[in-house]
Image: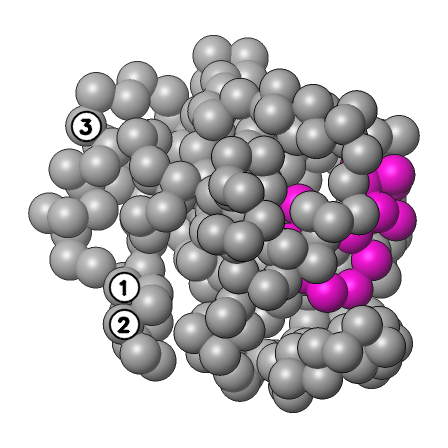
Amino acid sequence: MRLAVISDIHGNRLALEAVEADIAHVGVDATLNLGDLLSGPLDPLGTLELLQARDYPTIMGNHDRWLVERPPDAMDTVDRFVANQLDAGQREWLRALPATRVIDGDIFLCHGTPTSDTIPWLDNWWRGRDTTLPDEAAVSLVAEGLDHPVLLCGHTHISRMVRLRDGRLIVNPGAVGLQINHGSPDARYAIIERRAGVWAASLRAVPYDCAGAARQASDHDFEYWGEALTTGWAGPGELFR
Ligand SMILES: [Fe+2]
């Protein structure tokens, strides 16, 4: 079985379309989506329309949750930009997304960690530019009691894969729509594959029309997203304010 894993699209339909084309080129049985679907000043409704048509197995990210939980005046400017465009039906579609999910018994999906959509698992993300892997004890502790050979997480936008000593695989596919601290604007996702009973992961980076995405941000008066979208060097703190 071969599956694509996408996460953190953040309203970037151009990046999503490029990733979907790459997934079609690779050929998969299904695509799994780890959340943070719409929160970017790019094309949230176009992204939502595409995702609703695809109907990928999907979980809720922290930004998806904030869009339906927070009053607009408690949102960051990016979430407020998106929330103002959503109708009641679209809000309900977001609200119905589960926080975690298990696919075929083998694959566990969460956004941050199994118990939090805001805590990073495979990265010390958000401490300035420190995008290092936490130590083994910290990573393993989060996986305790999860009896699935593949554990998927997103949220940090940093693509990484870890194989625990017991063979379980933890994969963060990185972000489709917003590269931070990665030094490349290319859209990230992962392919996971089970061959002869063993799961393996490969992390992919797909060039796309990032200048077009930056133009969308600029058209919506979020010029400061342009540098991140076209270079991949910006830190997260500079983008959601
Ligand atoms: Fe997130």
SS at badge 2: loop
Determine crowd level at label 1: few under 14, some 14-19, many 20+ residues with C-alpha closer than 10 A: some
The residue positioned farthest toward the top in the image shown = 105
Name above or below for residue 208 compared with residue 223: above
SS at badge 1: loop
**Res 89 quadrant in image:** top right
What residue is disc 3 on? 144
Q: Amino acid at mark 1?
A: Asn
Q: Amino acid at mark 2?
A: Arg
Is residue 34 a member of the stretch shown in magenta?
A: no
Q: Magenta residues, as a range? A: 35-51
Determine crowd level at label 3: few under 14, some 14-19, many 20+ residues with C-alpha closer than 10 A: few
Q: Is residue 18 left or right of residue 106?
A: right
Tell me whether circle 2 and circle 1 mark residues in contact (CB < 8 Å): yes
Q: Amino acid at mark 3?
A: Glu
Which tag, 3 or 1, sits closer to the chain's start? 1
What residue is disc 1 on? 124
Residue at coordinates 69% horizontally, 23% vertically from top-left?
92
Residue 152 x %, y %: 45, 37
What residue is disc 2 on? 127
* Residue 103 visible at all: yes
Front: mark 2 or 1:
2
Front: mark 3 or 2:
2
The residue positioned farthest toward the front in the image shown = 73
